[in-house]
Amino acid sequence: MNSNFMELLSPAGSPACALAAFDAGADAVYAGLSKFNARERGENFTPDMMKKIVDYAHNHGRKVYLTLNTLLRETELPELMETLDIIDEISPDGILVQDLGVLRLARSYYPDLVLHGSTQMGFHNSAGLQLAESLGLSRVVLERQTTMEELAAIRKQTKLELEVFVHGSLCCSLSGVCLFSSYLGGWSGNRGKCKQPCRRRYYSKNGNGFFFSPQDLSALDLIPQLRKIGVQSLKIEGRLRQPDYVLNTVSAYRMMLDCPPDKFDEVLPDARNLLSKGCGRRWSHGFYSVESTKDLIKSDAVGAAGLRIGTVEAIRDNGFGFSVQKRVHIGDRLRIQPQSGDDGVALTVTKMFVNNLSTKYARPGQKAFICCDKEVPFNGGIFKIGESFPDYTRRLESLPARKKGVELKITLSGTKIEVNCLNAPLPPFSAPLTLDQAEKHPVDEAKILAAFSESDSADFALAKESKVEITGNWFFPAAELKKIRRDFWQKFHESVNPGQIIDSRINSLDKFRTDYLKITPHFSDSEYLRETVAMKPNGAEPADKRAVRADNIFDLNKLSQEAILPEFCPESKLPALKKAIRNAIDSGIRRFRITSLYALMLFEEFDKDQLFLTASAPLPVCNSMAVMELADLGCRRVMAHVEMSRQDIVDLQGKSILELEVFRLGRPSLLTTRAKIPFAGEFSDARGNKFELRFEKSSGLSRIFPVKVMSIPRLPGIYDFYDLRNAHWKNSDTETFNFDSQWL
């Protein structure tokens, strides 16, 4: 990629949003199919429509990246493979992945797919990017809580393409480790089903507020810095947003990317005016600066996105009334937000009255009544979340279906050209030639392929796998080449119909099924499975003297037998962590807990055969393919992901080639953030669920823990991990998280 070129990457939660993005000047869009993407609540795409959008993009010099960035349970692997097969046929410009198992399957069975690491993989330092490169990723979407200074330091140490978010909603938590939504009902943010509990109102002894709802990100004025650093792609968030948001936001960033450097400050106000139509929250620089991070949470600001236009003052069977604070028009989209901050009712304004007269719009100061058949909360805040936008229906209907790819092998000599069709029942086509030796510009493969790509057909197109073999250097008159091409396609159209085209790709599905049946899971015949206990610094020994005592890497003592590495390590602290690992090994520690992917690269200088590495929470391990990937990276044991149900764990156990462990007792972190939270201690939600917020000065991280202790029963043949850093053996107030319910 040109070092001076920065790709403008837009969300496309629907086909209409994709067209809006391209109309506004996006270089690429990212979009998902109906399953296995981090925005399953969006409209998303059917496979056929995705093919049309990919073809449209390629015909206009643009790109499409397909999202496959969720965690998968063991039983979903066969369906995932079918999805990968469809994606391979779609041929997007790249796929975004989170799950190591998805990455492994795509790389192993569909090697032509270009792989990008989703922000959900949590890469945030140079060690992580070194690992990403070794995994076969060509691009990484960095953790959103990486500062500009850290980004610049990372850029100098990697050749990978870097993609960063520049606009839209921000998650409060570090990417890929948030369990908040899942804890409150099984709706996992790591599986595209987040219910956004961070946007709700919470209550503490010091008052109540929206303690975990960050302002939106807007890095429009940071473009020159990002360009100087060498970022390849600027990503706009918003796959749940409508075409009007996409059109305005992409247009604003396109305006700033295209303007001359000396005009930047002059054009910036106009671009910001466009952005203001996006109906989002208050803008900020997100986590890009220490100052912005400290001021990111405004606990008195309602967590809902949009422009507040009023409050519900009256409710009738057919709608609601309110005093208009901001202009509202027929076709606008509204959300009515309850005071609790829970999900609000969304609707499109189709009928409205002012002073009992039907109207198309209402001005500030007027009393309006909006007709709807939905139940809205009294006193609920009314937010405009979008405006009317062009109808893309006809344009989408007019997009042509993808043509069937015809794979040709063309051989050329001075006396003959022969065309063999490799995926259709057509006899070899040949024509005699009398070609002269070329003095300057001999015909080459590209010219012949370009000629044969003109199939003059609504059903067929030259497949990208087609090849040309040329013996000698020949001058091939364009008119003669054109005639031969025309004769070949005429013969082809007369002899072949679309249903006779054979998929010439390797049958990866059959190969996977065969390989999957051969997996031999790990089995322990030991009656005693040695448990691991994580302790508080300077805490007493584990109750069971045979247990392994684990301590944080910076809190090791004479009793320590295992070191737990931090899940987040900024670039500036990597040297200290590497030194701590060397000191631990020199002191005799051989067991280490890997809580984030970056940490695997910190052991490359050591003999991993002499170490015992365990992939541990919050690093998610959900399926046997992820286990295999971690085994290749040197792990000997894996912890089943904390979110998983009993059946999910048992299914994983049946295919895991490594020792399997469960988080049996403790308080898992539900949300971890660098944002400054305006309080500490216990708090609760509107339903009475209780939590505790703790700030760790050494790391600068705040974490939410449930007050109830997670405690699950022992499972046969599976190792136990007890986390006593935030819990006690005898806690009576316990729960089982998703273990006895369903991980959605």
Image (cartoon, rainbow, N blue to C red):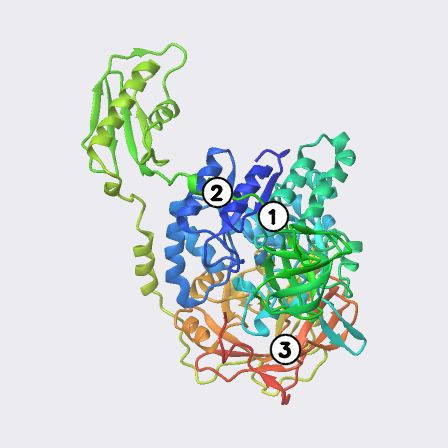
Task: Give the labeled residue for mark 1.
Answer: 388
- Judge the density around disc 3: few (<14), some (14-19), many (≥20) Cα neighbours within 10 Å: many
Q: Position of residue 547 (x, y in %)?
A: 57, 82
Q: Secondary structure at mark 1?
A: loop
Q: In front of the other: label 2 or label 1?
A: 1
Q: Secondary structure at mark 2?
A: loop
Label of residue 667 in the image = 3
Q: Is residue 3 visible?
A: yes
Residue found at x 21% / y 31%:
494
Residue found at x 79% / y 79%:
205
Instruction: Name the one closer to the observer, 535 or 690.
Output: 690
CA separation in Å, label 3 and label 2:
41 Å
Task: Give the labeled residue for mark 2.
Answer: 93
CA separation in Å, label 3 and label 1:
46 Å
The N terminus lies in which quarter of the figure?
Answer: top right
Is there a contact, CB below 8 Å, between mark 3 and mark 1?
no
